[in-house]
Image (cartoon, coloured by chain):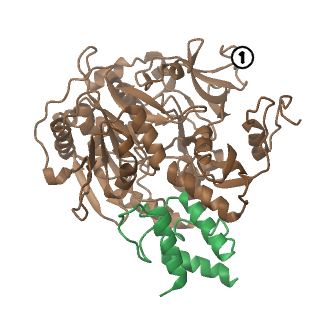
């Protein structure tokens, strides 16, 4: 199990899904699927920055980069490595 | 040649009766938008024409002809009538952009009930105040949103019916809930459309107020007259067009120009039920060969941010007319669209209260990038002195945009709020609450709001509503909410907060408060930044001076601070 992906998945599920919603997996479309909209993306980005002590530049925080747990994990890893 | 033709000729010869005649409406006779959007189009021989091409985020596609729209809207109407819904009852649509939203809207109007569309991203508090104020009788929603309705239904005794359009039987229905499957029930061939008249209420949209809770803007069936002709002339819609309005029908653009006008004109429209992505949008235009595209500045700026390279991957040559609404369209966006699409976005200006486009850059006329354009024929618009409410005699001065009342789609009132309605009129003018200047060619140039309302991505957010919700957070002692500039959304919400004793400002506290507001109100209302302060600027009588905080965010002079406490 990938711990980073689990943290992101659990956070998305607890913060952005209503009870009884269909569960998400690492590839569920978050932005294009309407689970996280562009305004809510700001709070998700803030969560990642706080949790992993990183700064994600606005030009990297695109709807495409936030569209699944897998993609978000990839983005976080890019900045935690730096 | 555009539908509109020559501006001066149109102004000289204009009468709203032109639209009435085209629609075959006789004053004094019944007029029902539901009929004009479906049955009438079929009677004109367009029953087999596509009315709606719908695509979901995963690529799922559904298509509906005008005959489908007629029969399925009858299905909604029959179902509502059988459920005891009567003319004048409020029926809410609380759904994503699924086909049932568009067809249900038409069906509700056929019964004589009032359609009350609400943005599906609203949190439970935003939903509650709007349903309570309207005393809504029934709501159509989806499984993914029903949890929000369940949280508030016990406080809504008027809400007798909760219809779930995609019920899958996996969990039991709860109190007052009922499954409604449009396609499962099948199309209903005949329904006796309720004979509404010009002044019969049709749609109730909620808009944010500066000092109070949201206000229900009440429209009537006669609004069709101006929605039809403005769509024909400003959006230049013709029989052969494939039209895409990107607005959500939770807001007025999504109903006036995303349902009523295109359906009444009998054009084919496309809907993409997906979150924003530049690639997905361009692919959608290419795939459906969209010809007329009505979007919003925030979306256009987001496309600009995505870059020009991506555009080269798609064939967008079908596009022939582009228009924009919701916020002022900056000149850079107009010039960008000329460069990448070979044609400009035409800015249009109007409001929830006006029901139709009032001021616009018209097809076939030179676009002045950054300008709102000129008044639609039949609309008397001016710039008023904020002191006398008299029109400025000369162009160039900044003042209030005032409109002479009387166009067909003007709101007929705020729901149960006569005083707020009266306050919208001064010296015989409807006050839009926006400031602008006129140039010597008669073009309007937007300057800003005349109040504290925040326009974020084309949606109005009330600072009062956000401040009230902030006070419900356990750590918040006081708050003040203002706009701050944003390169994509024009403005976003910023909150200044003082904390109660025992609570400590931190990044995690900021995130907790942001999420609290997002869930209670909506993602739009969520402060994108929270600044923790020890005190807020107040007058000596204790009133928080938002103006000073706003000026700080925008790098402006704070103005008169003589009443400031501790000054």
- Asked whether B322 or B197 is in front, the reply is B197
At 26% from the left and 14% from the top, the residue drawn is: B28
In this view, the residue in front, A43 or B37, is A43
Q: Quadrant of residue A27?
A: bottom left
List the single residue furthest toward the bottom: A1
Chain displayed in brown: B
Give the x, y percent position of residue B77: 20, 38
Q: Is residue B188 left or right of residue B515?
A: left
Can residue B329 be seen in the rendering of this structure?
no
Using the rendered image of the protein, determine whether residue B156 is visible from the camera's viewpoint. yes
User: Residue lying farthest right?
Assistant: B567
Q: Quadrant of the N terminus of chain B?
A: top left
Chain A is which colour?
A: green
Q: Position of residue B120 (x, y in %)?
A: 41, 50
Q: Classify residue B226 by image quadrant.
A: top left
What residue lies at 24% left-to-right and 38% top-to-bottom?
Answer: B107
Question: In this rendering, is residue B545 above or below B505?
Answer: above
How many numbered discs sit on the rendered protein? 1
The chain letter for the residue carrying disc 1 is: B
Mark 1 residue element: loop
Residue sitting farthest toward the front:
B502
Residues B451 and B171: in front is B171
User: How far from the left and from the top, in percent, is residue B317?
Assistant: 43, 56
Q: Is residue B494 left or right of residue B416?
A: right
Residue under label 1: B387
Horizontal side of B547 relative to B431 (left or right) equals right
Binning the other alpha carbons within 10 Å of mark 1 as few (below 14), some (14 to 19) or many (20 upward) gives few
Q: Which residue of the protein is positioned furthest toward the left in this rendering?
A: B189
Q: Position of residue B35 (x, y in %)?
A: 22, 32
Which image quadrant: the C terminus of chain B? top right
**B344, above or below B20, in the image:** below
């Amino acid at each position: 199990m990938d711990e980073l992906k689990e943290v992101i998945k659990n956070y998305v599920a607890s913060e952005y899904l209503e009870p009884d919603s269909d569960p998400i997996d690492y590839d569920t479309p978050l932005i294009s699927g309407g689970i996280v909209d562009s305004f809510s993306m700001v709070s998700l980005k803030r969560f990642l920055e706080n949790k992993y002590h990183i700064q994600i530049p606005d030009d990297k925080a695109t709807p495409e980069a936030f569209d699944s747990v897998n993609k978000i994990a990839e983005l976080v890893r890019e900045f935690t490595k730096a | 040649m555009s539908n509109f033709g020559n501006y001066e000729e149109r102004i000289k010869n204009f009468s709203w009766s032109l639209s009435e005649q085209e629609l075959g409406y006789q004053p004094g006779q019944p007029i029902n938008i539901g009929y004009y959007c479906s049955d009438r189009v079929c009677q004109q021989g367009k029953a087999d024409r596509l009315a709606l091409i719908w695509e979901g985020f995963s690529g799922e596609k559904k298509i509906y002809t005008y005959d489908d729209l007629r029969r399925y809207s009858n299905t909604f109407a029959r179902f509502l009538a059988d459920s005891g819904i009567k003319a004048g009852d409020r029926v809410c649509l609380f759904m994503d952009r699924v086909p049932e939203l568009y067809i249900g809207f038409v069906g509700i109007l056929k019964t004589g009930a009032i359609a009350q569309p609400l943005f599906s991203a609203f949190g439970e508090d935003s939903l509650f105040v709007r349903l309570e104020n309207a005393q809504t009788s029934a709501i159509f929603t989806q499984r993914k949103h029903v949890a929000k309705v369940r949280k508030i239904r016990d406080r809504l005794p008027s809400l007798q019916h909760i219809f779930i359009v995609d019920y899958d039987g996996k969990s039991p229905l709860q109190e007052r809930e009922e499954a409604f499957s449009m396609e499962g029930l099948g199309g209903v061939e005949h329904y006796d459309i309720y004979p509404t008249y010009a002044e019969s209420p049709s749609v109730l949209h909620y808009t944010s107020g500066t000092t109070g809770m949201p206000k229900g803007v009440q429209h009537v069936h006669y609004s069709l007259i101006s929605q039809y002709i403005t769509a024909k002339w400003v959006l230049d819609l013709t029989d052969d067009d494939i039209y895409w309005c990107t607005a959500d029908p939770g807001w007025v653009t999504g109903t006036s120009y995303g349902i009523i006008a295109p359906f009444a004109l009998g054009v084919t429209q496309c809907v993409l039920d997906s979150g924003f992505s530049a690639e997905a949008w361009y692919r959608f235009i290419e795939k459906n060969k969209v010809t007329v595209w009505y979007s919003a500045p925030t979306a256009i700026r987001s496309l600009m941010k995505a870059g020009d390279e991506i555009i080269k991957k798609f064939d967008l040559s079908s596009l022939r007319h582009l228009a924009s609404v919701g916020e002022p369209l900056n000149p850079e966006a107009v010039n960008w669209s000329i460069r990448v699409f070979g044609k400009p976005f035409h800015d249009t200006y109007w409001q929830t209260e006006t029901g139709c486009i009032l001021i616009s850059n018209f097809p076939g006329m030179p676009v002045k990038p950054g300008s709102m354009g000129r008044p639609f024929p039949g609309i008397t618009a001016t710039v008023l002195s904020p002191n006398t409410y008299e029109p400025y005699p000369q162009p160039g001065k900044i003042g209030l945009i005032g409109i002479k009342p009387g166009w067909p789609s003007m709101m007929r009132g705020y729901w149960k709020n006569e005083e707020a309605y009266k306050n919208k009129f001064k010296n015989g003018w409807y006050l839009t609450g926006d400031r602008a200047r006129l140039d010597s060619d008669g073009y309007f140039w937007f300057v800003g709001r005349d109040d504290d309302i925040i326009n974020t991505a084309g949606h109005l957010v009330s600072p009062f509503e956000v401040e009230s919700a902030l006070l419900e957070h356990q750590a918040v002692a006081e708050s003040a909410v203002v706009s701050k500039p944003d390169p994509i959304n024009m403005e976003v919400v910023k909150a200044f907060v003082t904390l109660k004793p025992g609570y400590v400002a931190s990044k995690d506290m900021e995130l907790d408060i942001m999420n609290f507001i997002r869930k209670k109100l909506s993602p739009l209302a969520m402060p994108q930044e929270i600044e923790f302060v020890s005190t807020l600027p107040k007058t000596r009588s204790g009133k928080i001076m938002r103006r000073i905080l706003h000026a700080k965010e925008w790098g402006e002079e704070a103005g008169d601070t003589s009443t400031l406490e501790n000054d």
